[in-house]
Image: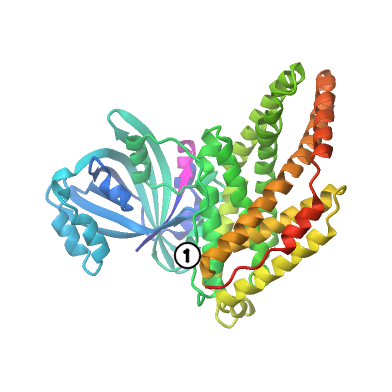
Amino acid sequence: MEVELKLLLDPADNKRLIQHPLIAAHASGAVRSAQLSAHYFDTPDLHLLHHGAGLRVRKMDGIWIQTMKAGGSVQNGLHQRHEWEGPVARPWPQLGKLRKLMAGQPAWQAVLDAPSLKDRLDALFSVQVERRTWDLDVDGNQIELVLDHGTIERHGQQVPINEIELELKAGQPIALFQFAQQLQHDLPLHLSNSSKAERGYALCVQSGTVPVKARALALAPDDSVAAVWLAVLGNCLDHIQRNEAAVIHGDNAESLHQMRVGVRRLRSAFKLFDAAAPCPPALRDDIDWLGSELGTARDWDVLSEATLGQLSGHLGQELVTLQALLQEQVRSSRQSAAQALLSQRYTRLQLALGAWMQQLAQMPDDSGDAQALAQPAGSFAQQVLLRLHKSMLKRADRSVAGDPASVHRLRIAGKRSRYALEFFQSLYRHGSTQRYLDALSTLQDRLGAHNDLVVAERLLRELQQQRPEAAAALAYVRGYLQAQRERDATDIGAVRKSVHALHLPQRA
């Protein structure tokens, strides 16, 4: 299993990396330089890609080497994949040799046994890089540091490459994150969850960026809390990071929404597991910062597209004037969110999360936290869901129609219950789980509409202070929304009744 951490670096900073004293302090030999040329192969219908595999033939020191990477996982820039490689006679794959290397891996051998695969393979794109390699000894961990500078090319289209790979040859994965954290003190680095193959395939598919929702988790009742916690953390990070590119480079409001939901799920998860593995305060502060950056942009999106979008048939010139102002706010807040994701603070957050997750995975069995994390997931989930259910009942009883803050607290309690059950739902019976989730979703929709109007009032008031020339239009729209809020006031009695009618799902 290949284990490596990928980081992106601006080519203008390559010299600073090459001369960095941290490398000199840990290098066990001289730097090695090479020009590498690789061709990546697949079928016209992308058979290998659809099975989570990549196949290349690369020339190294005058010898052609074929490599297939497959399976594994990518999380916080840490790539863990199966890898099989060996020499071939020419710049073309030899599938028979690969099958022999895969002895004991029938699932991956089956991928190569697809009908006529050999005849359908073709070179889809190529990678040309200048590579510098250092062998490092970092506190007993053997790490290969690679700097690749070059291009990915397909049919005349090129994508630049300038990346660092920290590959673990022997030792613990946490060493990769810790070494990257030290480098980041002096160099502007960014984590990369995309391999060269994935970036090359992007030239083939040209799919663009799309919103990505959270993937379902598969847990077992006898899993330890530690295993479940790491799975939940990884699931939240996957949800966040798979929407990064769209938020940075696109203008799809749903991608921003999904990334914000991912951060909310992460924050909720930290609260769920706080007693077993409390989050370091500095890490929590950075997660709150990220949530705030995304939340501000999302609030302006909702005001512009959802809240005021419903008024197009009721307001005239006032709405036209306001929409022009709002578009400026939407663009500005989205740019701020994108800059937050490109910032070094975001990279520090990701590296710190990666290091902390590795610490959890390596926690000594006799530590206090380890004992709490060793309990079975089934009983832990039941305790958590019961506690959140009781809290939601209490919030419902304390909600008052004229007190937006109390209604908001009930909404948050319902959301935390929903996120928790989504994390643990594979441990519960599907029917009762789905009924509970549907009820919580309905509750969130009812209270969310009320909250959107409360947020709209706050944002419009801020805008009125910033843009006094539009005060009349803003005051008119605020008045209209206030009247709508009073007319469509949430029936707290009915909400309270629906919350008390909820029954916790049954365990599988």
Q: Residue at x 32, y 41 (%)?
A: 129
> Residue flagged by tag 1: what amino acid is it?
Ala
Q: Which residue: 36% across, 47% down? A: 132
Can see residue 462?
no
Question: Is residue 463 at least partly visible in the picture?
Answer: yes
Residue bounds of the magenta highlight: 7-15
Residue 232 within the segment the image draws in magenta: no
* Above or below 311: residue 289: below
Task: Judge from the rendering whether residue 306 lies leftward or rightward of residue 477; answer left or right.
Answer: left
Tag 1 secondary structure? loop
Q: Which residue is mark 1?
A: 218
Q: Quadrant of residue 237?
A: bottom right
Point out residue 334 in the picture as x, y percentages from the top left corner: 63, 34
Q: Residue at 69% of width from left, 21% of height from top?
A: 324
Question: Residue at (30%, 39%) from the top-left corner?
Answer: 128
Please give left or right for residue 19 compared with residue 82 in the image. Answer: right
Q: Position of residue 97 (x, y in %)?
A: 15, 58
Nearest the eye: 343 or 331: 331
Q: Is residue 38 left or right of residue 342?
A: left
